Image (cartoon, rainbow, N blue to C red):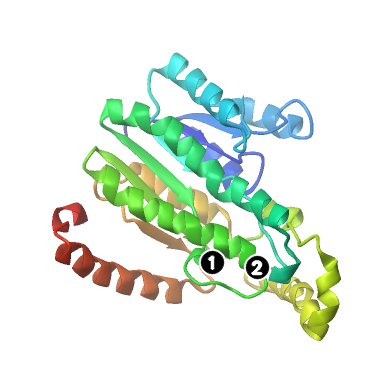
Amino acid sequence: MEQKVILITGTNSGFGWLAANSCAALGHTVYATMRDTKGRNAEKAKALTQQANIQVVEMDVTDGKSITDAIATIIKKEGRIDVVVNNAGIYAVGIAESFTEEDLDNILNVDVAGPWRIIRAALPHMRTQGDGLIINISSVAGRFSFPFQTPYNTAKFAIEGLTEGLHYETKQLGIDVVLIQPGAFPTEIFGKTATGSDTSVLEGYGDLAKVPEQIGAGISQMFEALKPDPQLVADAIVKLIDTPKGKRPLRTVVDPVTGSFSEIANTKVKEQFGHFLTAFGMKEMLG
C-alpha cells in the first residue's frame, strides 16, 4: 500500500479523530488540524501527537492565512500533499426562521467556505503533482432536506454542488474529488449544535417550535437502540484513499440506519446526469 500525506480537518473529535487514527495506523502521514491546540483542544492535540505518524497543526477553516500557513508547513516538510479530508463542520437544528443572516453566515463560513478555502489552497500542489484526492464530508441531508435543520441542509447541499462540479473538472488532471454522505452517528457534533438566535419568532410557530427538541430525543433513542458506529465513516475514508485513482465513486453513503433511500437517489441521479453530460458533449468526463 502506497503511503500518503494526508490533511484532515476537525480532528479534535468525531469522524476526524477516528479518521486520523485509522489512517495513521496504516502508516500514512497524517496532519491532523484543529483550532485552539494550546487551549480547549490541548488534551486532544496531545493525545493525537502521541500516536505514530500523526502531527497536529493549528488551523481555523474560517481563516485563509491559517489555512495557507498550514498547507505551506506540510509542503515544506513533505514536498507534497496527497489527500485532503474536509471534515470540520457545524450542525444546526431549529425553526429555520429563527436563524438570522449572521447565524447562517457562521454556518456557511465553516461548512462551505471553509472547505472551499482549503481546496483552493491544496489544488495548485495537486495539479503540479498530477495526482491528489479530496474527500468532502457531506451528509444524507445534502441529498434530502430534513425539516428543522434547514440551515445545515443548505450547507450540505452546497457541498454536494461544489464537490460534484469539481469531480468532473479535475478528473482529467489526475485529481479525484469525492463525497461521503454519513447518516446520523453518535459523535460530539450533537453536543455543539447551533440554534437560531432570533427566538422571538418561535411563538408564532406554536407546537411546531417544540418539534426540534422532540427530534433530538428521538435521535438519542435511535442511537441507544441501534448503536451506529462512527468508525464506519473512518473506514469509508480509508477505503477511498486505498481505491485506485479514477475508480473512486463520486458519492459514498455511510448510513446503516436509513442509507438505502440515499443510495437509490444517488444511483438514479448518476444515470440521468450521465445522459445530461453526454447530450452536452462532455461524455468523456464520465470516465
Q: Nearer the viewer, residue 33 or 225?
A: 33
Residue at point 85%, 69% (across, down): 200
In x, y percent, where is residue 199?
Answer: 84, 67
Q: Residues within 10 Å of mark 2 (few under 14, many from 20)?
A: some
Identify the residue position indicated by label 1 in the image. Answer: 141
The residue beneath circle 2 is 149
Which one is earlier in the sequence, the residue at label 2 or at label 1?
1
Name which residue lies at 42% across and 31% down: 122
Q: Residue shown at 40%/52% (left/top)?
A: 163
Q: Which mark is residue 152?
A: none
Per the image, label 2 sits on a secondary structure element best described as loop
Percent position (x, y) of residue 215? 72, 75
Please give left or right for residue 273 compared with residue 110 in the image: left
Instruction: For the residues labelled 2 and 1, say whether their Cβ atoms are less than 8 Å apart.
Output: yes
Residue 279 left/right relative to 229 = left
Identify the residue at image location x=79%, y=34%: 40
- Residue type for callout 2: Gln
Which quadrant is the N terminus positioned in?
top left
* Outermost residue, top side: 76
Instruction: Locate residue 275: give its quadrant.
Output: bottom left
Expressed as whole percent of the image width and height from the top left, the position of residue 132 reads: 33, 35
Report whether residue 244 is seen.
no
Hey, what amino acid is under mark 1?
Answer: Ala
Q: Residues within 10 Å of mark 1 (few under 14, many from 20)?
A: many
In the rendered image, which quarter is residue 228 located in?
A: bottom right
Asked which secondary structure carries label 1, the reply is helix
Q: Nearer the viewer, residue 72 or 63?
A: 63
